[in-house]
Structure formats: C-alpha cells, structure tokens
Amino acid sequence: MNFKEAKKRTTREFEEKGIVLTEGEKDRIEVTDFGLERLDEIGLQLIVYVNNSRYCAKEMVLFPGQTCPEHRHPPVGGSEGKMETFRCRHGKVFLYVEGERTRDRNCNAPPGNEEYYTVKKEIILYPGEQFTIRADTKHWFQAGKEGAIVSEFSSRSRDDLDVFTNPAIER
Amino acid sequence: MNFKEAKKRTTREFEEKGIVLTEGEKDRIEVTDFGLERLDEIGLQLIVYVNNSRYCAKEMVLFPGQTCPEHRHPPVGGSEGKMETFRCRHGKVFLYVEGERTRDRNCNAPPGNEEYYTVKKEIILYPGEQFTIRADTKHWFQAGKEGAIVSEFSSRSRDDLDVFTNPAIER
C-alpha cells in the first residue's frame, strides 16, 4: 500500500464508521510510515482536530495488524512532556506500556525490529475503553485483525520531539 | 422529560450514532438542567471521558432545540481559565460567542431569560466543523431541530467554577 492508497482507505474507514470530517480535514489526513518504508506493518494514519499550547485531539486509524512503534514524549522546555489518553472507538487495540511484562502477549514486534520494542505490559482496548499514558514513558500499540479507530486526547502535541526506541525512525 | 428519561435517551442517541460507551460510562452520564427545572429547553447531557490537570475530553448530547446557557470559564489559581474546542459530530449546533452581533440569528434565548444571553455573534457548526473558545469569554449554544452530538476538547475542566450570566443557575 502506498501513501495515497492509505489516505483514501483512511477516509473510507472514517466514513463507514460515521466519523464526519470536513473536506479540508480529509485533505489534511496524515499518513506516516515513520521512515521505515513498511507502511502495511509499521505506520499510522491520523487527523489532528486541534493542537494548541494547552491541549490536543486527534483521530487515528490503524489498519489490521499495523503497529505504531515504541516511543516516549520527553519533557519540553519546562513542561513535563505530553500526557495522552487513547480511547478505542472501533476495532481492537493492543497497547504496550512500562510495567510488569504480560505473559502470553497477543502481539509481536514487527519482524527484525524486536530489539526496539522493550515495554511488554499489555493493555487491551475494546470500543469504549481507554487508557492514559503518563508523560515520558515508553509505549507502542498494534491494531487487531479488523484494524482500529482510536481517539487521542492529550496535552500539547510536539510529534517532532518524540523519542523513538528505534534510532532509524524519523517522524 | 425527567432526568432518568434524559439519561436513557442520551444512551440511545450515542448508540444510534455508533459512539460506544462502556457500561460504567453509561452509568456516569450526567444530565443537568442547571437548576432551572426546564430541562427540555435548558440543559445538557454529557459523559466526561477524561479530565486531569492538563486536558479534558467530553461527549455531549443536546436534544432538539435544547440550550446550554451563557457562561464563561474564569482564571483559576494562576491558570488562565478553561479553553475549549467544540466539534459537532452529528446534527447542528448554533454557537454564540463574543464579537460583532450577527443579524438575523437562528436562535432565540429561552423565553423569559433574554437578559442572560448577551453575546450574539453566531457560529453555525455542521458535522465535522468545530470552533475554539478562548478562556474567560462568554458563550452559549443551542441544538438545531434534530438535536446534536458535540465533542468537547479542552484544558482542565472545573465545571463548579463556571460563571453563568444568569445568577439563578447552579451547576
């Protein structure tokens, strides 16, 4: 799948689930493969609704089995780093966070990248369920077989400052 | 309509639009008539998804023609007051904010309460459209004929500190 196809598919996913975007927002849908060129496996599609100095809200689409790679949101100039709440709207999301490792986890890291997925406490989010990630703590997530739509509510977002465990990643 | 009926109807509205809540959230749906005992005309139904020291997210239901009365979010102990973004998800919302008064506005204040609705710049929000309210500025809103579902993204929410133009209101 290329970026253009991913953007089109994202628009369709939102439409099918009754999540309405303006035409301007449809144009602004972001697709990222985090510079790894394995979009089907490692990537994220999203629309930023609002991002100001105080809060941020996004709607994200993950395709079936797609992974958002491990990262953290470090402190930024006096502020303590982004804190965020993931709310599953549709599908299923497997979220991995710092803490005691879960045995028999549902997901594997993308093949060949295992060393960059270090946190292994599993949180499963079904529609209507949510989880809040403390600032500056590592996390990654993967969609279930049917993909997922996830709302993100957070403090100010500075994606360019995210710190990924995999040094090859560029956001 | 009494509070119990309003809560049930809110649950149904969310379900019909594919907005999934957990059972715990359904129990926690808030219905307020702002102490005016005219819920059909003046009231709000909502679920708070998250509200912490940094950000807040809610989903609100307005029944047809229902009004959320004029208020502002004042500065709180060193912080500049709540800033918020209303995003219309379904239906239509008429939002009134500070600024040049709009001629031929779509909504009237609830009968008898005209003096408590002082801001008259009209913003119409259709599904997918949103508007951000600066801290400490007056605003009120009313749903169109088919009602509305509105997401609110904001800085920390302190509903108990809201300042309503109508002194009879208790939140």
Image (cartoon, coloured by chain):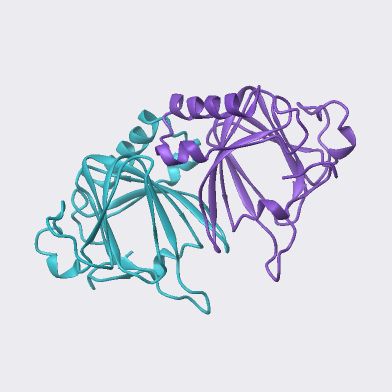
Chain colours: A purple, B cyan
**Quarter of the figure that contains the C terminus of chain A:** top right
x and y, in percent, of residue B131 in the image = 37, 54
At 14% from the left edge and 70% from the top edge, which residue is drawn? B115
Identify which residue is drawn at 53% across, 79% down: B78
x and y percent of residue B58 in the render?
A: 45, 50
Examine the rendering and report whether any part of residue B21 can be seen: no
Up the image or down, A59 lies above or below B103; here it is above
Residue B131 in sight in this render: yes
| Most distant residue in the left direction | B112
Residue A126, compared with residue B60, is above or below; it is: above
Between B159 and A83, the residue placed more toward the observer is A83
| Residue at point 49%, 29% (across, down) | A11
Instruction: Judge whether B50 appears above or below B147 on screen.
Output: below
Q: How many marks?
A: 0
User: Vertical placement of A140 versus B112: above or below?
Assistant: above
| Location of residue B126 (image quadrant) | top left
Report the side of B77 relative to B86 (left or right): right
Q: Give the camera-side residue of B109 and A41.
A: A41
Image point 59% across, 27% down: which residue?
Answer: A6
Towards the viewer: A122 or A22: A22
Residue B112 place in picture, x, y as percent = 9, 63
Quadrant housing residue B165: bottom left
A88 relative to B14 in the view: left or right:
right
**For this rendering, which residue is in front, B36 or A130?**
A130
Q: Quadrant of the N terminus of chain A?
A: top right
Q: Is residue B58 left or right of residue A106?
A: left
